[in-house]
Image: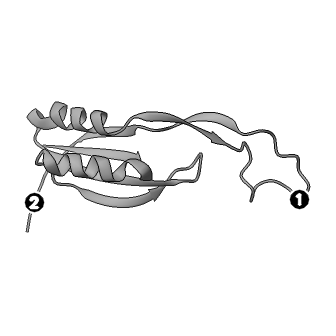
């Protein structure tokens, strides 16, 4: 058995959760926050048999695509008063970060 840990942007959560359910995958959803942009994320814990890993990764990849977003370099709470705020810069957001971990033991009660 494998545990697929998937971190996705808040804007992608509905699409990926609906797609996972439609394809028969069960998961646990945990709210989380990204470190770089300080925006909301969702972390999904998906338990699958080893033979299903490629299929769940395909569902994740089809549901979460990266896109460009403009952000300020310094978040407002980190900039000293009177600091010049440069023009926003373009960064990639979205997509998914996925970890596939071996599960030594699984129990359901």
Residue at 12 percent of width and 43 percent of height = 1
Mark 2 closeness class: few <14, some 14–19, many ≥20 residues within 10 Å:
few
Q: Quadrant of the C terminus?
A: bottom left
- Residue 50 is situated, as x and y percent measured from the top left of the image, at 12, 36
User: Could you say which is closer to the camera, residue 29 or residue 105?
Assistant: 29
User: Could you say which is closer to the camera, residue 4 or residue 65?
Assistant: 65
Residue at 88 percent of width and 50 percent of height = 83
Say the numbered circle drawn on residue 81: 1
Locate residue 84 relative to residue 11 in the image: left or right: right
Q: Could you say which quadrant of the image residue 26 lies in?
A: bottom left
Instruction: Name the element at disc 2.
Output: loop
Residue at 88 percent of width and 59 percent of height = 81
Q: Residue furthest bottom?
A: 109
Say the numbered circle drawn on residue 107: 2
Residue 104 in view in this figure = no
- Residue 23 is situated, as x and y percent measured from the top left of the image, at 13, 44
Locate residue 61 relative to residue 19 in the image: left or right: right
Mark 1 closeness class: few <14, some 14–19, many ≥20 residues within 10 Å:
few
Residue 86 in view in this figure = yes
């Amino acid at each position: 058995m494998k545990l697929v840990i998937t971190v996705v942007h808040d804007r992608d959560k509905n699409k990926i959760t609906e797609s996972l359910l439609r394809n028969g995958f069960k998961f646990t959803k945990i709210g989380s926050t990204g470190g770089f942009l300080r925006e909301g994320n969702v972390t999904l814990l998906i338990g699958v048999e080893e033979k299903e890993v490629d299929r769940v990764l395909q569902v994740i990849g089809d549901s979460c695509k990266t896109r460009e977003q403009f952000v300020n370099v310094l978040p407002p709470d980190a900039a000293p008063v009177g600091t010049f705020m440069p023009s926003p810069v373009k960064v990639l957001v979205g997509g998914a970060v996925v970890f596939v971990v071996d599960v030594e033991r699984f129990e359901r009660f």
